[in-house]
Image (tube, rainbow, N blue to C red):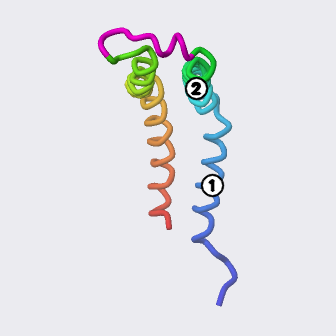
Amino acid sequence: MSTDTPASAPAESAAERYLAVQRSDEFAGLRRALRGFIFPMTVAFFLWYALYVILSAYARGFMGTKLIGNINVALVFGLLQFVSTFVIAWLYSRFANRRIDPVADRIRDEIGEVTHEHGPRG
């Protein structure tokens, strides 16, 4: 019985390849682009939500202002929270399709070529 493990060599090269991709400029750019969208959008949404909560707590007169019938400013702001959530999701989807997915697909294909050269993972 031999102590050589030729099957482990491809796994090591695949692991090395993953680390090389993680260190690549393309991957760093992908992370930078993702952070450039997610962090500002998260801050903007949090501030918008905080405004709603603060106005509800401290500007009850303003939030209770009736606009049409029994619909007041607080109800409109509350419904706009849902609208803004869907708008952010839609914007992210467009952003990801244009800026994130093409780069991620290239990286995945590059890694896939390496892992297919050495056989299936597992």
Residue that sits furthest to the bottom in the current view: 1
Amino acid of disc 1 = Ala
Amino acid of disc 2 = Thr
Q: Residue at x 49, y 54 (%)?
A: 115
Compared to residue 49, the image places residue 13 above or below, namely below
In the foreground, 77 or 96: 77
Image side of residue 69 versus residue 6, left or right: left
The image's mark for residue 38 is none
Q: How many labels sit on residues?
A: 2
SS class, disc 2: helix
Q: Residue at x 43, y 27 (%)?
A: 85
Instruction: Report the span colored magenta.
Output: 60-69
In the foreground, 92 or 96: 92
Q: Quadrant of residue 60?
A: top right
- Closer to the chain start, of discs 2 and 1, is 1
Compared to residue 111, the image places residue 83 above or below, namely above
Compared to residue 36, the image places residue 21 above or below, namely below
* Residue 105 percent across, percent down from the top left: 43, 36
* Mark 2 to mark 1 CA distance (whole Å): 33 Å
Query: Can you identify the residue that label 2 sits on?
Result: 42
Residue 101 counted in the magenta span: no
Query: Can you identify the residue that label 1 sits on?
Result: 15
* Residue 7 percent across, percent down from the top left: 57, 71
* Residue 72 percent across, percent down from the top left: 40, 15
Residue 66 counted in the magenta span: yes
SS class, disc 1: helix
Q: Quadrant of residue 28?
A: top right
Residue 33 visible to an observer of this rendering: no
Few, some or many residues within 10 Å of mark 1 (<14, 14–19, 20+)? few
Are circles 2 and 1 on residues that touch, CB within 8 Å?
no
